[in-house]
Amino acid sequence: MTDTHRSTARFDGAPPEGLLQQTAGYLRAYDLPIELGDTGLSARFSEAYVELSMDDGGFSLDIRAGNSAQLHQAREGVLVVLDQISPEACAGLEWTGEMARNVRPPNFHLGTVLEVRRVSAHFLRVTMGCEGVLHLLTGGMHFSLLLPPGPEPRWPEVNEKGRTVWPTGEEALHRAAYTFVELDAAEGRFSFDVFEHEGGLATGWARAAQPGDIVGVMGPGGGDFPQADHMVMGGDETALPAIRRILEHAPKGQRGEVFIELADPADRCPLALPEGMRLTWLTRGEDAPLKAHMLAAELPGPEESRFVWFAAEAGEVRAARQYFREEAGLKRQEMYLSAYWTA
Ligand SMILES: Cc1cc2nc3c(=O)[nH]c(=O)nc-3n(C[C@H](O)[C@H](O)[C@H](O)COP(=O)(O)OP(=O)(O)OC[C@H]3O[C@@H](n4cnc5c(N)ncnc54)[C@H](O)[C@@H]3O)c2cc1C
């Protein structure tokens, strides 16, 4: 990563009590890799680096990233954490360097529906025209789809203090995370698959969407392609697009296992499975549950390069997190366990 984009901040005065330890606690809860010292800490936010250093007169922040969108995202993340620890300290920061003000967020783009077509029994593929595709290529596999409540949307804006302000009340946007299926920067388009489920706002939107409809696209973000010699992967319908993309990018020599649980076998799709990986399709309600397969999967010891990737309903993920952290003893950097929806 080149750190050509930089934003720094200074707080003069008595720092909030336990600032370092509290910040470290929040960052660990978000599973971000951190290094903690006596007078400072550094952390990686996706593609950006953040340093917090304490001194006798107060504390300083230094954020570096490869582009404006990543810098903005990291800055927002820092502010969210600081706001929870001390809103006063957060408001008292004097910022210098690059900072978006009075504009749309640098990681926000408008998307125009080009086509919606059915790809399987319960999946619709949406193809979207988007000027910002080049910026969506690196920094995560996912984006937030922002659906406006009416024909004259109000989009998020960065205010004069550099903070993103979201429309509220009747103007509030519906946000749902999706995974890119394909990104084509030359053509300025990308696609994603919507799993149709009862009561889903995005489901209703995708079913009714027409070419020319405008939505907001915020990203990229979320997890990136995991890298390890041995991978155990699992997920439900919502994770299928991510698993498919990870397998497309996996090296030929990749070893491991993949479990995918679907309600309807008619949603199974071809996957680019490396030779050393075994794939098990599970049918919900008929086979042993996904979680049981994940927990029973064989994992090499800590001396080997290994990774567990699991995305599904929040309760399933909670149980898996407890098992892999506490019983299997995996380190944070050896797993991605993410709640993709909440029942
Ligand atoms: C990083 C990430 C990547 C994701 N990628 C994809 C993707 O590529 N494709 C995809 O289809 N989904 C994906 N998801 C899941 C998707 O964001 C959620 O399912 C989201 O709730 C869908 O929004 P909605 O507007 O349809 O439903 P909402 O309006 O948010 O929820 C309405 C109701 O639907 C229920 N609900 C939500 N999801 C499901 C479900 N899967 N099954 C049954 N009931 C459900 C909720 O409990 C709620 O009661 C991803 C999630 C994350 C976090």
Image (cartoon, rainbow, N blue to C red):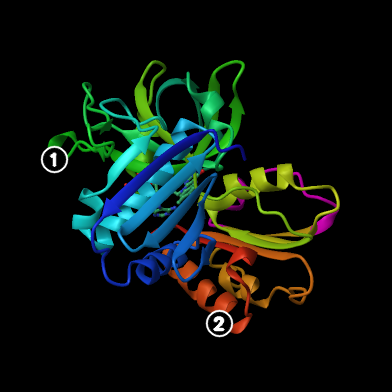
Q: Is residue 276 magenta?
A: yes
- Local packing at callout 1 (Cα closer than 10 Å; few below 14, some 14-19, many 20+) is few
Residue 133 visible within the image? yes
Residue identifier under label 2: 326
Residue 85 picture quarter: bottom left
Q: Is residue 199 visible?
A: no
- Residue at the spot x=46%, y=37% of the render? 6
Placement of 78 over or under 134, stated as above or below: below
Q: CA distance from mark 1 to mark 2?
A: 42 Å
- Return the residue at label 1: 169
Residue type of the residue flagged with mark 2: Glu
Compared across the picture, whether 278 is left or right of 120 comes to right
Task: Provide the residue span drawn in magenta.
Answer: 262-277
Above-or-below relation of 105 to 24? above
Q: Secondary structure at mark 2?
A: helix
Q: Quadrant of the C terminus?
A: bottom left
Where's residue 143, x and y in %?
46, 39
Amino acid type, callout 1: Gly
The residue under the point 63% across, 80% down is 328
